[in-house]
Image (spheres, rainbow, N blue to C red):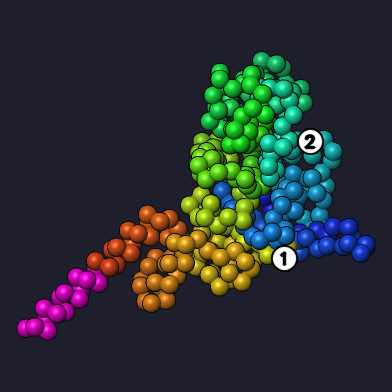
Amino acid sequence: MALLLEDLSHVYMPGTPFETKALEGVNLKVATGEMVAIIGPTGSGKSTLVQHLNGLLKPTSGRIQVDDLDLSQARSEQFRALRQKVGLVFQFPEEQLFEETVFMDIAFGPRNLGLPEEKIASRVRWAMEAVGLNYKELHQRSPFHLSGGQMRRVAIAGVLAMHPQILILDEPTAGLDPQSRDSLLRQIRFLWKKLSLTVLLVTHHLSEVAVQADRIIVMHQGRIILDGKPGAVFQEVDILRDIGLGVPLVSAILSGLREKGWPLPANLVSVEEAAYQIAKIYRQNRSKAGLDRGVMSC
């Protein structure tokens, strides 16, 4: 088990007029190697939740376990090791870039670990290649002279260079154009498979996770209200609409067809899969209708 949360609650500024309950009674298990999407409207508690997972925030109540480490009993040196194990990429991570070159920015984390320079150089090259950046062309460039998508990849490479086992990405595609967004999402899924990472992807864009994640957690008002496979979660059209999320267009179409009696499988999430199944059922119905007309004419 990579992550275990039991009855986790968090209150900002308790005992003041600004007291805000951000999380309330969250229970969650994430197995090693899973890719899990956490979705929900703004203010649902998504970012607050993931900031507990590497000790940036401490729970008001409840328990968090990362692998075999209980964070409520962890010592300061264990938190240092935890932040190597759990890599957190914040929303708009390129705003945290600050070094003169791409190489120096990615090297910052490994250098703080006290690694020798030759190992740092190896990790930087590896991390850049892992996120699809050409080391030879870009490592001496200023990160501020790159495109938005490239800057985002540099920031992710800086986290990967720490060799985390768990990668958490908070709205990784925010502000990117559609082409950069799709490219980055494909790269994240590639990294998940290639490196056998446990990945938590935080977003409010349902279409992004429909074909990326194997499991979706839906949050609302600091609680988990849905947890399951994408196809099952996207069937809960009324619940998702009630909290302001809606559903991907393909899921809305499938839901409407099911209401009309079409026997469509529950696990459909991609346009290609949906189109194939709809066409299959349509052909079957036409064939059956033709057979029935033939019988009647006899």
| Residue to which mark 2 is pinned | 80
Q: Secondary structure at mark 1?
A: loop
- Up/down of 274 relative to 144, above or below: below
Give the crowd class for mark 1: few <14, some 14-19, many >=20 residues within 10 Å.
some
**Can you tell which quarter of the image residue 12 is in?**
bottom right
Vertical comparison of 110 with 155: above or below: above
Please say whether residue 165 is visible from this viewpoint.
yes
Q: How many marks?
A: 2
Residue at 69% of width from left, 55% of height from top?
A: 46
Q: Quadrant of residue 152?
A: top right
Say left or right for 192 vs 269. Answer: right
Mark toward the start of the polypeptide (2 vs 1): 2
Residue at the far top in the pictured view = 118
Query: Of the residues tagged 2 and 1, which is closer to the observer?
Result: 1
User: Is 289 on the left or on the right of 176, as rendered?
Assistant: left
In the shown orientation, is residue 191 left or right of residue 106?
left
Q: Quadrant of residue 68?
A: top right
Could you tell me which secondary element the residue under label 2 belongs to? Answer: helix
Residue 277: percent from the left, percent from the top? 33, 62
Horizontal side, residue 197 vs residue 296: left or right = right
Residue 186 pos. (x, y %): 50, 41
Task: Identify the main secondary structure in magenta.
Answer: helix
Q: Is residue 141 above or below residue 224?
A: above
